[in-house]
Image: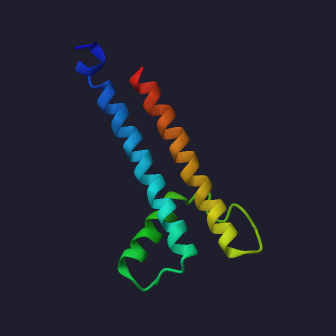
Amino acid sequence: MSPRYRNGTHSAGTVIAVVADVMAFILGLWIVMYLLDANRGNDFVQFVHEAARWLAGWSHDLFTFDEAWARVVAGYGLAAVVYLFVGHAIANRVRH
C-alpha cells in the first residue's frame, strides 16, 4: 500500500472534493428551483434557498442585470463554479 493511502491524504482530498461538489449542487439546485418558480412556502425550497444564499453570500447581487433570473444565475452560478474549481484544486493538491 502506498504511503498516500496510509497517511490519509487520499481520504482528505476526497472529502474536500465531495464537500465542494455538495456546495455546488446546493447552489445549482437553487438556480433550477428559482428558474422553475418553486413554491417558496415549501420548507425544502426554503432550506435550499437559505443554504444557497449563505454559500453565495459573497457573490449574491454581485451582478446588476435588469432581469432577476440573470442575477440569480450569474451570482449563484459564479459561486458554484468557484467552489468546484477551488475545492477540486485543493483536493488535488492534498492528494499529491
Q: Where 19 falls versus 90 (above or below)? A: below
Q: Residue at x 77, y 74 (%)?
A: 66
Residue 2 x %, y %: 27, 13
Q: Where 70 falls versus 25 (above or below)? A: below
Instruction: Give the image quarter of residue 70.
Output: bottom right
The number of numbered discs placed on residues in the rendered structure image is 0
Residue 60 x %, y %: 61, 63
Q: Where 93 falls versus 48 (above or below)? A: above
Residue 58 x %, y %: 59, 56
In the image, taking residue 6 as reference, residue 61 lies left or right, namely: right
In the image, taking residue 44 as reference, residue 68 lies left or right, namely: right
Q: Residue at x 47, y 71 (%)?
A: 49
Q: Residue at x 42, y 19 (%)?
A: 96
Residue 25 x %, y %: 45, 56
For the view shown, which residue lies furthest in the top direction?
Answer: 2
Which image quarter is the N terminus in? top left
Instruction: Give the image quarter of residue 57.
Output: bottom right
Q: Residue at x 57, y 48 (%)?
A: 81
In the image, taking residue 93 as reference, residue 56 lies left or right, namely: right
Q: Where 45 falls versus 29 (above or below)? A: below
